[in-house]
Amino acid sequence: MSPTEAKTVADFLATDFERETQTTLRVLEAVPDGHLDYRPDSKSKTGLGLVRHIALEDEWLLTCIANGAFTPPPDDSDACGIKNPADAVARYRDTVPAALNRVRAMSGETLAGTINFLDVMKMPGVDFLAMALKHSVHHRGQLSTYLRAMGGKIPGIYGPSADTQ
């Protein structure tokens, strides 16, 4: 992919990611405090674990893309400081738009350049931006399936839900 193509695709993906952050925030805000230990299966993350994963890794992926190098993923244990959905929402609002703006500021040459993902795979930065967007939407979808079982309501995601009509 040429630098001009990489920049064009990245601009599109960044705009899409920005729109998706609003939906992600609605889902995070809908998580009730009372049942954060809920998990649909023993192999699944808890509600709080998934909230932390989204809040921390969306920013981590974008920051690593902007830095041109991946560091180990963030610690999503109790030590991360996110104790409830409100903490996650505040952190997401503070860190994700700033990290996304750093990606937006990248040159086409840098976006077309290869980044090493922890010696697991190597791809152009723009491809990692596409992956970051998919990662965010995927885990938000998981969390949205937890909400009713946790005693919450599903916000509108791509249109109204049964709870928002």
Image: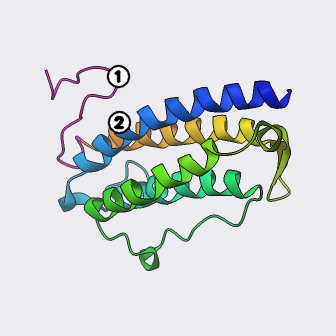
Along the horizontal axis of the image, is 81 left or right of 4?
left
| Residue at the (56%, 37%) spot, across then down | 133
Chief secondary structure of the magenta span? loop
State which region is magenta: 148-165
Element at label 2: helix
Cα–Cα gap, marks 2 and 1? 8 Å
Question: Percent from the top left, x then y, of residue 37?
Answer: 31, 62
| Residue at the (20%, 60%) spot, across then down | 33
Element at label 1: loop
- Tell me where residue 38 sits by quadrant: bottom left
Which is more toward the observer, 91 or 134?
Answer: 91
| Residue at the (64%, 45%) spot, across then down | 105
In which quadrant of the rendered image does the C terminus lie?
top left
Question: Percent from the top left, x then y, of residue 101?
Answer: 55, 47
Mark 2 highlights which residue?
23
Along the horizontal axis of the image, is 56 left or right of 114?
left
| Residue at the (68%, 57%) spot, across then down | 64
Residue 103 seen anywhere in this rendered image of the structure: yes
Q: Amino acid at mark 1?
A: Tyr
Marks 2 and 1 close (CB-CB < 8 Å): yes
Mark 1 highlights which residue?
158
In which quadrant of the rendered image does the N terminus lie?
top right
- Tell me where residue 80 sits by quadrant: bottom left
Question: Percent from the top left, x then y, of residue 88?
Answer: 35, 60
Question: Percent from the top left, x then y, of residue 73?
Answer: 63, 64
Q: Dot 1: few (<14), some (14–19), or many (≥20) neighbours within 10 Å?
A: few
Q: Amino acid at mark 2?
A: Thr
Along the horizontal axis of the image, is 154 left or right of 165?
right
> Is residue 159 inside the magenta stretch?
yes
Q: Dot 2: few (<14), some (14–19), or many (≥20) neighbours within 10 Å?
A: some
